[in-house]
Amino acid sequence: MNSIQPQTPPRFQRPGALPFVLGIAALAFVIWSFQSSGFSLTQFQRGIPALVRVFGQMFPPNVTDISRILWSLLTTFQMAVAGVVLGLIVSLPIAVLAAEGLSPHPLIRHAARGLIALFRTVPDLVWALLFVITVGLGSPAGILTIMIDTIGFAGRFFASAMEETDKGPREALTAIGARPSGIVFSAVLPDATPSFIATSLFCVEKAVRASVVLGLVGAGGIGVELKVAFDLFEYDVAATIIILIFLLVIAVEQTGAWLRRRII
Amino acid sequence: MRPDDFNLSCAGAPRAVSVSGLTKRFGARPAVFEQLDFSVPHGEAVAVIGANGTGKSTLMRSLIRLTEVDEGQIEVLGQKVRGLDPTALRRLRARVGFVFQKHNLVLRLSALSNVIHGAQARHAGPHVWAQWCAPAHVRHEAMECLARVGLADRASQRVDSLSGGQSQRVAIARMLMQRPELVIADEPVASLDPKAGEEVMELLFNLTREAGLTLLFVSHHMEHAKAYADRIVGLGQGKVMMDMPSRSARADELKDFFMEPVAA
């Protein structure tokens, strides 16, 4: 038997000076964030009875006006679908311009990527406020917001999907002397179709969720009904709306998942 | 026969391919080939042989500028390839059928759609992007090309459901649809089993011979080079080491070109 006992490594390694300082700084920032935001557990505790009271008033949900709410829900869904379709149509050419290997010039690629990044990084509520100011209250503002949001989301994923397509058919068509448009439509798009469908279905799901919130700032849809119900303290009506929104989002997500499984 | 003798013997004949002083380096590594001279008269079938890494594929690709060379002149079908602008290069590529090692077809599309892509050598626009939007005369011609490779009954089948040999035949049909004047095949049977490889090689040879086309192919099979080429060009150490009529090439002369270089 070997008499030399192998040395067991320590459980934790001593951090270097820089990671130690950075760790302390991060911890200090977290504590400062809680203090600055005025978060306190006592305040949260004080809010619990009110929360229970509101929940109590929500049940049973008020269904007397359900036909109007359902109609509004349908309008919301239609707003989402219209916005997504417009967004997908616009995002496809932008994505081609943003895709490496397909874009005609690096400057155009950077410009297209910049536009997609702008659409994606500015929150949809900000776009909604902008469109409410410019085109007025109602669904058109919501549709435009969803369109912009879809371009930001789908543009990025469409471009990635096209970049990842098989290079072989593209090269074969290049060797044939095909034009760039021919290569995109004959080789790239058919190859990227499953990915496009998956992304498009995610866009619909995302848009349905977003369209609910957009109503809160006046961009049409069921969000308006929800805001009015809360403003008038009709929590039982609000409960009906929330349950129906929940059912719609679940239905769209499940249908999307099923379609993705079927198509891809 | 030495390379110089051969070049002298066909000095007056029109050339489908003529390269001189060709040099290609990848980064700081030694040149793949250096000061390479080589030509293919119209209507001939020429096999290029050589061990791995001797630049056979690079040479084939450089003929239609899928790969750029560092020095030298390339003349294909009477055009100086290196000086061509993008439009002229596309027109030249349209006249050259290129069969790759892998079929390079769009897997999600039908055999017929893939063959129709070959017409992009002559036309641009949606009518040559896929079979469903192609006019009757384009579909008819593509079906004839599929019939010539014995796959008319598989026209509607998606390429990802075809065997390797069948896929390579579809790639040959796509090349026929191009109506090329010169056919370059870069190890067209490399990814196929021996039986399918034999069939594909025979098909390629017969089709080009019937149409009186020039065929330049890279092969790793001594039998193919002997059976299907009028002339065999052997590459090694970055140069043309052998260039002689296939009927006078002896097996012991050829075998060195099929052996892998011994690692130092």
Image: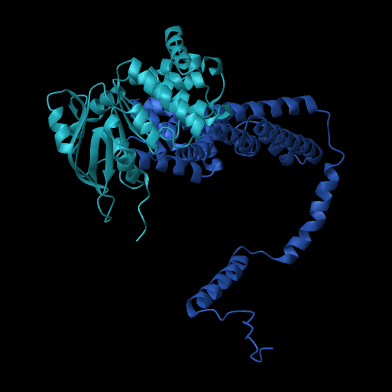
Chain colours: A blue, B cyan
**Viewer-closest of A204 and A139:** A204
- At 24% from the left and 40% from the top, the residue drawn is B242
Classify residue A102 by image quadrant.
top left
Against B121, residue B40 (above or below) is below
Q: Count numbered badges in the picture.
A: 0
Against A182, residue A99 (above or below) is below
Against A89, residue A129 (above or below) is below
The residue at the far bottom in this view is A3
- At 31% from the left and 23% from the top, the residue drawn is B94
**Viewer-closest of B229 and A109:** B229
- At 42% from the left and 38% from the top, the residue drawn is A99
Q: Position of residue B22 (x, y in %)?
A: 20, 41
Q: Position of residue A188 (x, y in %)?
A: 46, 31
- Does any portion of residue A206 appear in the rendered image? yes
- Does any portion of residue A94 appear in the rendered image? no
Q: Would residue B164 appear left or right of B183 to someone viewing this image?
A: right
In the picture, which quadrant includes the C terminus of chain A?
Answer: top right
- At 39% from the left and 30% from the top, the residue drawn is A172
Q: Position of residue B8 (x, y in %)?
A: 12, 31
Q: Would residue A231 appear left or right of B202 to someone viewing this image?
A: right
Q: Position of residue A109 (x, y in %)?
A: 37, 40
Q: Would residue A227 appear left or right of B150 to someone viewing this image?
A: right
**Viewer-closest of A222 and A10:** A10
